[in-house]
Every structure is written in structure tokens, then in C-alpha cells.
Image (cartoon, helix red, strand yellow):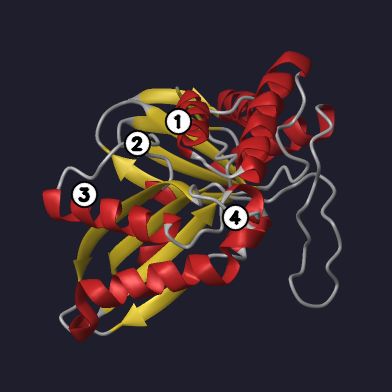
Amino acid sequence: MKEINSVEVANLIESLCIKANICAPEDVMEGIILAKAHEDSSYGQAVLEDLLENIELARKERMPLCQDCGMVVVFVDWGQEVLLVGSTLQESIDEGVRKAYLENYLRRSVVNDPLYERKNTGDNTPAIVHCRLVGGNEAKFTVVPKGMGSENASALAMLSPADGQEGVINFVKSTVAQKGQNACPPLIVGVGIGGNFESAPILAKRSLLRPVGSRNTDDRYSQLEEKLLEEINGLGLGPGGYGGRVTALDVHVEFMPTHIAGLPVAVNVCCNALRHASGHL
């Protein structure tokens, strides 16, 4: 049995929070460069140029990519041969988030009560933690600081199996059409199909972590990704919502088994600053 001290977890989470907020993933930057080559709109071109400049400045000046430093989501794959010593996993992760946000001047955006008091917790905790037990003696962490602008553009539908592929396409397209311009396009759109009410949205969010330009290994879902990307870009929202050819950099679809009576579909929209960073212990 391998032991990991909770301090190690906190330190790793701290470094991942800082990296994710400052350094745009290479695949996202390459996606924006590719979008610039395809964008016809002068306004769209200007937006894409600004985004690339922002990425370079953030890295150079060690400043956040976006003023909304997000609510921290952490995906954990915990090896069954690993024992955590010290604080709980949630406490360890929250300590790392706390240090990262307080000591690096990252905006704290979490309130303690969603409806009534709405008092800022002051340190951007608690984080939202999704933990899977896996084989092996390693613990892997992926930190995703997710802004609420793109979360507010996301949606879940409990479709009927009779709705089929056409129903899925219509729902995804209408979701982006209604609120996508408010989510800082060009977007990355994650789609989760199957499971149930709570698992489809998590599937959609996980799909965002795939590299921009990657395709589902199942040919049917790969073709669905291509179709959805074409439909979304056909909306003409364009970079920054100013109109243009490139509304989305990519669409990622993931699926899982579901009940005979259901077709859950979740759309998790992400802005152009698809911030995430991974590490392991």
C-alpha cells in the first residue's frame, strides 16, 4: 500500500490551480490559430488576435487568462492501492485551492449560500470534487477552474429515445443558439449522452478535457461531433459574438449506457479559455 500525505495533495492542487489559471493549454491555442485561418469576419479576426495576445501576456506576466478565475472543479482518479494520510481528500484539495487563490491574487468567486445570504467564502472554496476509484498505486488530479458565464449557457435535457439523433442535434444547437454568445466564443462544447440525470452533465464536463481537434473513437459519435460542429458554426455567432464563421473551436461527445426509457443529453459549454491542468502523485 502506497501512502500519500494530505500535504502533498494540497501542494499539488495549489500548483495546478496556478498553472490552469495562467497557462492556456497548447491544443486550445492551436485551435484559436486554426480558427483565425478560417475566419472571414474582420471583427472575428480582431477578437482571435486579442485572444492570442492575451494568452502570451498571461504567460509572460504570470497573470490570469481571465478575470473570472472560476469555481474549481477537480477530477480525481484514485488508485485502490493508495492510502491518504492526514486530512480528508476534500480538506486537502480545499487547502490547495485556498493557498493558490489567496497567495496569487486569483479572484475568489464562491458564495456560501446560493439563494439567501450569498456571502463570499473569501478563499474560493469549497472545490467541487469528482473522485473515481481505479486500479494501481497512483492518484491523478485534473483541476478545472470553470467560470460561470459558460456554465450559465449549459443545459440538460431528458429526451425520449424516440427523439434520436435529430433530437440530440436540435437540443445541442438550440442551447448554443440561445446563450452561446454570452459565453465568450469561440466555444468548446462538451456533450454527454446517456446515463441518467446526474451522470450526463459530468460526462459532458469530462469531455471538455479531451484535446481540441480530437475525435471520439466510435465512428458514429465521431461523425456526430463533426455534424454538431458544422451546425454550431452555421449559427454565425462568431468570435466574441460579433458574427463570423467560427462559433466553436470543437465539439466533444461522450456517451455511456442508459435506461431503456431514457435519452439524457447534457451540454456543457466552455469559453475560449478552456483552463485545466493535470498532475499525479
Front one among 113 and 159:
159
CA gap, disc 4 and disc 1: 17 Å
- Closest to the camera, between mark 4 and mark 2, is 4
Q: Which mark is residue 34?
A: 1
At label 2, the amino acid type is Gly
Q: Amino acid at mark 4?
A: Gly
The three-letter amino acid code for the residue at tag 3 is Ser
Mark 3 or mark 4, which has the lower sequence index? 3
Residue 180 in sight here: yes
**Do the numbered discs 4 and 1 sit on residues whose CB atoms are within 8 Å?**
no
Secondary-structure class at tag 4: loop
Residue at the spot of label 2 = 213
Image quarter in which the N terminus is found: top left
Question: Spatial distance from mark 4 to mark 2, Cα to Cα?
Answer: 22 Å
| Marks 4, 1: nearer the viewer | 4
Tell whether label 3 touches label 1 (CB within 8 Å). Answer: no
Q: Residue at x 65, y 54 (%)?
A: 242
Q: Image check: 165 left or right of 244?
A: left
Distance from Cα at disc 3 to Cα at disc 4: 27 Å
Tell me residue 56's x, y (percent): 67, 20
Task: Give the structural element (helix, strand or loop) at label 2.
Answer: loop
Residue 257's label in the rendered image is: none
Label 4: how many Cα within 10 Å (few below 14, some 14–19, many 20+): some
- Disc 1 from disc 3: Cα separation: 20 Å
Identify the residue position indicated by label 3 in the image.
222
- The residue under label 4 is 243
Q: Secondary structure at mark 3?
A: helix
Q: Earlier in the sequence, mark 1 or mark 3?
A: 1
The answer to whether residue 266 is above or below residue 139 is below
Q: Residue at x 84, y 32 (%)?
A: 105
